[in-house]
Image: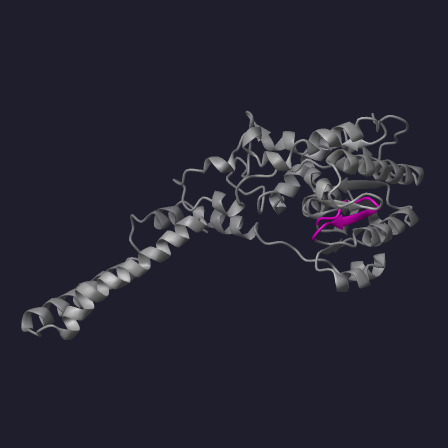
Amino acid sequence: MPAWKVRLALLALSFVLAWLTYVFVEKPIRFGQTGNIRIAALAASLALVGCAGYYTYAHGGLPNRSANRALEEGFQEKLQFNQQQLTWFGPDPACFQLTGLEEERKNQQEVFCSLKDDLDSVQVAIIGDSTANALYPGFRKVLNERGIGLINLGNAKCGPYRGLQGTVDWNKDCDQIDRKIYDFLLANSRIKTVILGMVAWDVPDMRFDGIPDNAPLQAKFAMFDALVNRDIAALRAAGKNVVITYDTPPFATDARVCIPRSPRDKLPAACTPTEDQLRSKEREPFVSMWKAILAKHKDVCIFEQSPYLKTNGRFHMLNSDGILLFRDDHHLTYVGSEYIARKFFESPCGPAIEGLARTGEWK
C-alpha cells in the first residue's frame, strides 16, 4: 500500500486528468463538428488498442515486463509466500474450555488461547501480550521436534503479571484474565517452563491499583517491579523454570512496505534501521528500566530477541532469503517466530526447555 501522501496525490491527479479529458477529448467529440477525419482517427485508435490487447493476450503478457521476468525467475512464489506471512491464526475454541477463559473470550476480542497439542504433552507455556502470541507458531514447531507440547495464553496489550489493570484505553480487565491464567499454570504440574512475554513500552500505559493513571514513569515501574517479583516467586515455588522476553524492536514502517515486488526492487532504508532509527520513544528508557528490574533475578533466564535480529548494526525486517520476519511493525511472522525459536535453543535459555535440571542461578 503506498503512503497516504502518495494516495492523496494520485486521487487529486485523477480529478485533474478527468477534467482535462472532458475538456479536450469528450467535449470536442460530442459537441464539435463531426467529420470523416475524426471518425477515422477514432476508429484507428480503437483498432490500435484492440491489436495491442490481442498481442498481449497471445504472448501471455509483455515478455520484457518486470512482472514476467519475476515470474520466470520463480519470484512470484516468494511474493505469495511473503503475503501469506501477513495473515495470522485464530485461537482454538477447545483451549478456552480447558483453561476456564470462555467468558473472557466472549467479552474480549483479543484473548489468546492456543493449544494444538494434547494437554498431557504440554510442558511449556508462553503467556503475555500479542508479541508473546507471535512466538507461538515457531516455538510449537521447534518444540514438537523435541516431543514437547506447548500452550499459549494471554491477551493483547496485557502483560503476563497479575495486578495489571490493562491500558488506559484498551483491555481494562487484564488482571482478571491473568489471574485465571496463573490459576491454570500453578495447578498444572506438567508445565515445567513458563515464558513471559510483553513489550517494554506498554508499562507507561498500564494502570495500577493505588496510583493514578498519569503517575510518573518511575512510580509505575516501581509498582511493576513488585508485581514481577511476586509472580516470578510464585512460578519458581511451583517448580517451574521462568524465561522472560520483552525487547521486540519497534520498526518505523509496516512490513508490507518491505515486500519486494520484483527481484530488482531496492529495499527501503526503513526495513533495515539502526538502533537510532527504530521508534526510539517506544524503546527507551523502558528497555533500560526492564533490565534494571530483571538484573537481580539470577534464577530467571532473560531471552533478548533483538541481538538475533540485528546484523552489522542494523535490524532486519526480512531474512537473508528475502522472507518477512515481521508481519507489521513489531510482530513476528511464522518464519520469524521459528527463526527466534531456533535461536532460543542456541541461547543460555534453551536448556530449561531441553529438560536439563537446574537449581539456584541459571547455568
Residue found 36% across the figure and 54% down from its top? 10
For the C terminus, the quadrant is top right
Residue 316 position, x and y percent, is 55, 35
Instruction: Judge whether 225 appears above or below 83 on screen.
Output: above
Residue found 74% across the figure and 30% down from its top? 289
Quadrant housing residue 173: bottom right
Instruction: Judge whether 142 appears above or below 39 on screen.
Output: above
- What is the span of residues highlighted in magenta in the rendered image? 157-169
Residue 22 position, x and y percent, is 22, 66
Residue 199 position, x and y percent, is 69, 40
Residue found 71% across the figure and 29% down from its top? 288
Nearer to me, 308 or 286: 286
Residue found 57% across the figure and 49% down from its top? 85
As drawn, the residue found furthest toward the left would be 36
Quadrant housing residue 233: top right
297 relative position to 50: left or right? right
- Secondary structure mostly seen in the magenta stretch: loop
Nearer to me, 213 or 2: 213
Residue 89 position, x and y percent, is 65, 55
348 relative position to 90: left or right? right
Instruction: Judge whether 253 appears above or below 91 on screen.
Output: above
